[in-house]
Amino acid sequence: MSARILLADDDSSLRFVLAQALGKEGYAVRATGNVATLAKWVRDGEGDLVLSDVYMGDDCVFDALPGMRTARPNMPVIVMSAQSTVATALSAAGAGAFDYVPKPFDLDDLMAVVRRALDGGPDAKTRAQASKAEKEERLPLIGRSPAMQDVYRVMARVAGTDLTVLIEGESGTGKERVARAIHDHSRRASGAFVTLSLAGAGAAQIDRDLFAPGGKFAQAEGGTLFLEDVDELPSDAQTRLTGLLHAEDPKMRPNARLIVAAQRNLAAMARQGSFRQDLYYRLNVVSVRLPPLRERLEDVGDLARAFLVRAKREGLPDKTIDAAAIERLKTHAFPGNVRELENLLRRAAALSPASVITSREIANELGAERRENILDSEADEFEAALSRRVAGEFAAASPGLPVTGLYDRILAEVERPLITQALSATRGNQIKAAVVLGINRNTLRKKIQALGIRTGRGD
């Protein structure tokens, strides 16, 4: 029995052409020019595949897709649209469409998409996921979760404007990708997209980079300036930026759209007095909150597959990931967010001996990450304790300075536990301990003597 295709497009000429082409391929076609009829046919159990335009009159098929997918969750939907915007592509992916085909299209290409969607072979789902991953890898953002749909809707509304946008989210959530996507689909897309990170920068450096002739504002003339970590902006630079944005003479204001990103809550900072309220209100014209990955774990599978496609494009081995591995990934909190997931998949692609990444390999990778995080945390604690120890020397000597030899005294305090632990781990074997420490054996012996360290046994 031939597959039944439900075709929806309000262009009667295109409906006729597509019906003829699909008929020649052996498909049975039922066509309509409105969304309501299409949705009713799906609910009534008709058809094996939907091929639909996005807009038909005042109706949008994306509004009907959730109900259609609830009624027929396994029915593939192919979306066609002449409005080839990021919002349309993201909406298609977010609504769960099998594929998105921008108009105008080649009929042979469209027929290939239809055949792939209707392929009932045992690995049809795997091929569909691979195709979807290839497509999504090229999108600026990936995800079908409700949290990401909120992001897409805001992006679609502001992309065509010059409004200032504040993007808030944890490190690694993709704030720069959002900013660039907004720029690329704005009327300033032909202009430059200029970025400046404010994290750790001093006031003098920011003044040079941002406000000086030839600085970032000048470079972004006619385009978009993206300021990362605006919550790190020093108070004097906040004042300078406020004045620039508040200038009454339009000629004094920069001709660059401003998009800023912050990891911390700027509203709370403004209430606490650590960020200028007037600047906050000027930056927070439109706000986008990027959810951390732990709030949209349903997107992990799509992200993982797209990252493996990206890794292959960058020269890493061609790998796929199985369902159990994706479920194992979903148990992780991902403190590093999407960036952490991408790095994990890149490592797995490089190191996995098999063509399919399994849950065991993911468990090993996550275990290694936990060990690295523990070591990083302990290193931070050690640095903080050492800083307190050095500060104590200066505080004890106040108002003068510590006696000479501070370097050697502190170094001896660090070396003693380091050498003691190395000797303990090697059961007193000084040759092995020297190898672990990366120093000459004679150097180690001299340090043991100088520090008065008791060894468990000799060589």
Image (cartoon, helix red, strand yellow):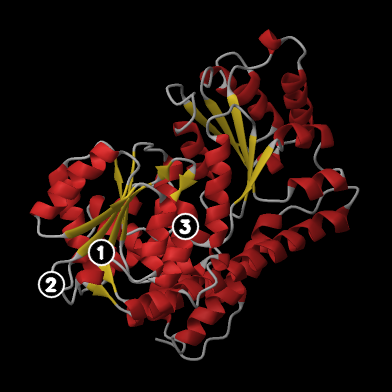
Q: Nearer the viewer, residue 62 or 123?
A: 62
Asked whether the beta carbons under mark 2 and mark 3 sit within 8 Å of each other, the answer is: no
The answer to whether one can see residue 380 in this image is yes
Query: Of the residues shown, which amino acid type is indicated by label 1?
Result: Ala
Query: Of the residues shown, which amino acid type is indicated by label 2?
Result: Met
Asked whether the beta carbons under mark 3 and mark 1 sit within 8 Å of each other, the answer is: no
**CA–CA distance in space, label 3 to label 1:** 22 Å
Q: Quadrant of residue 385?
A: bottom right
- Circle 1 is placed at which residue position? 128
Residue at (79, 34) in percent of width and height: 235
N-term mark: 2 or 3: 2
Residue at (37, 65) in percent of width and height: 42
Q: Quadrant of residue 143?
A: bottom left
Could you tell me residue 221's position as x and y percent? 54, 17
Could you tell me residue 246's position as x and y percent? 77, 20
- Circle 2 is placed at which residue position? 1
| Number of residues whose C-alpha sits closer than 10 Å to that of mark 3, classed few (under 14), some (14–19) or many (20 or more) | some
Secondary structure beneath disc 3? helix
Q: Nearer the viewer, residue 359 or 108?
A: 108
Q: Quadrant of residue 412?
A: bottom right
Disc on res. 64: 3
Residue at (68, 34) in percent of width and height: 202
